[in-house]
Image (cartoon, rainbow, N blue to C red):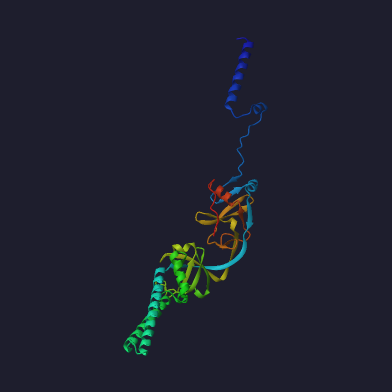
Amino acid sequence: MSRRAAIGWAGVGAGISAAVLLGLAPMRNAAEIVEGKRPSVDGPTTTASSSRDGEVRLERAEQQRVGLSVAPAITTTAPAITHGFARGLDGGALAAIDAEIVTARAAAGASRAEAARLAELFAQDQSASAKSVEAARAQSAADAARVGLAERRIGLEYGPGLARLGPGARHALIADIAAGRAALVRIDVPGANLDALSRMRIDGSAVAVLGPAAAADARLQSAGLLAILRGPIAASVTNGRILDVKVERGSAESGVAVPRDAVLRWRGGLWVYRQEGPESFERVELVDARPIGGGWFVRSGLTAGNRVVTGGAETLLAIDRNGGSAAESDGD
């Protein structure tokens, strides 16, 4: 083979090799190959991440885009809370006693009038004997005694507070119980001085205390209070149902106040995102928190000065849950 032919075949081989190299690098830019530049291998920049459950990192630019804002938890005090329990009482028994009172009063009024009529006839020496007058008076006295006994049954079986209600207030209460607008409950707070207790709440609804209960609790041997519960929960308070009671004592305890907008409801609890650094946040559960004013009172988990997310907390939760749905809205 001549020298010129060998050079020609070498050129052809070099061209084929270059074509093969270009085919094996489909994402390279031809201009970069010619100029000797190295193609970029970096992926897209990550602006949000969740390294482990409860921790979220969010770059500042992304914080501004989602409207994230924070506010400090501030020191405050709130009344100390004691927990007790309430038991629903039978409103039907109260209605039966009330009906007995009404019936006894009607009978007593009729027998009293009959005794007066016979006494007048006897005085006029008409168709009434002394014996009939005495019998009518005895019946009138018996019917009056039945009225007194029926009225005392309320105090003996429920307590003096309910006995002090007038007939009109008692009728209205029984009507509300029958309609599900109210419920009669017994409240027990073991180990507490009942005189030192103030406001009580059952499932967020306030209760009106009537006075001490008629008897001690059979199992705990503790004194109790008789109260009226109103609100949406009243319709479900059946006879014997047990409910948790939060009772405010006279003393106060220290904690921090958390803005309402910072609190999320998730997994059956209350949570906030606490700022740990310029771009890092940690989810913190609020244990035994309770609403006060425009926020929540917290005794542990947060300290004064901790910055919690008030705007964009739902976004952090979605990132925390790897793109899950937003949290439930906060409520009392």
Q: Is residue 15 visible?
A: yes
139 in relation to 182, above or below: below
263 in relation to 10, above or below: below
Quarter location, residue 156: bottom left
Q: Measured from the top left, where is residue 207 in percent x and y?
A: 50, 68
Q: Going 55% across and 68% down the picture, which residue do you hit?
A: 80
Q: Measured from the top left, where is residue 177 in percent x and y?
A: 44, 67
Q: Measured from the top left, where is residue 14 in percent x and y?
A: 61, 19
Quarter location, residue 111: bottom left
Q: Is residue 86 visible?
A: no
Q: Classify residue 100 as left or right of residue 34.
A: left
Q: Nearer the viewer, residue 273 or 13?
A: 273
Q: Classify residue 247 as left or right of residue 144.
A: right
Residue at far top of view: 2
Q: Quadrant of the N terminus?
A: top right
Residue at far right of view: 35
Q: Nearer the viewer, residue 248 or 1?
A: 248
Quarter location, residue 17: top right
Q: How many marks?
A: 0
Q: Going 56% across and 50% down the picture, which residue do you hit?
A: 317
Q: Measured from the top left, where is residue 227 in percent x and y?
A: 47, 70
Q: Going 39% across and 82% down the picture, which residue do you hit?
A: 113
